[in-house]
Image (cartoon, rainbow, N blue to C red):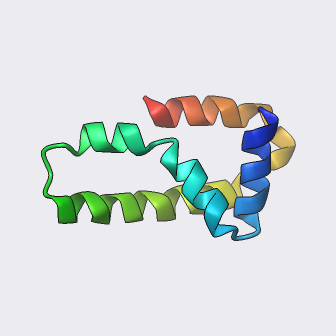
Amino acid sequence: MNDHMFELVRKIKEDDEEAIEEFVSTFTPKIINKTKNLKHHDKEDLKQELTIEITKALKRFNTDKAPELDDYIKKLKR
C-alpha cells in the first residue's frame, strides 16, 4: 500500500472527515459515470450511502495486512 493511502486509512480509523472525503473522491469519477442516468437527488443519496459503507469497511480494515488494501481498492474501482 502506498504511504498516502495508508495514512488516509489511519486517519479514517480516527474519524477524520477530510480523510474520508479525500478517499471517497478517488471514486467520484466512477460514481458519476455509473449514475449519469439518475436524478441529481438520487446521485447525492448514492454518494452518501457509498461514503458511509466505504468508511465502515475501512474502519474494519486490518492495516497489518496493508498490501491487500491496494488490491481491495482496485476491485472497488472496477
Task: Indicate the quadrant where residue 60 lies.
Answer: bottom right
Residue 37 is left or right of residue 54, and the answer is left
Query: Residue at the location (69% across, 37% down)?
Result: 69
Task: Indicate the quadrant where residue 44 lies.
Answer: bottom left
Q: Nearer the viewer, residue 55 or 32?
A: 32
Residue 62 is left or right of residue 78, and the answer is right
Query: Residue at the location (55% across, 58% down)?
Result: 21
- Label count reads 0
Is the C terminus in the top left, top right, bottom left or bottom right quadrant? top left
Residue 23 percent coordinates (x, y): 59, 49
Task: Indicate the quadrant where residue 50 lies.
Answer: bottom left
As drawn, 43 above or below 31 = below
Query: Residue at the location (46% across, 42% down)?
Result: 27
Residue 61 percent coordinates (x, y): 71, 52
As drawn, 6 above or below 56 = above
Query: Residue at the location (65% across, 54% down)?
Result: 58
Residue 56 percent coordinates (x, y): 59, 63
Is the N terminus in the top left, top right, bottom left or bottom right quadrant? top right
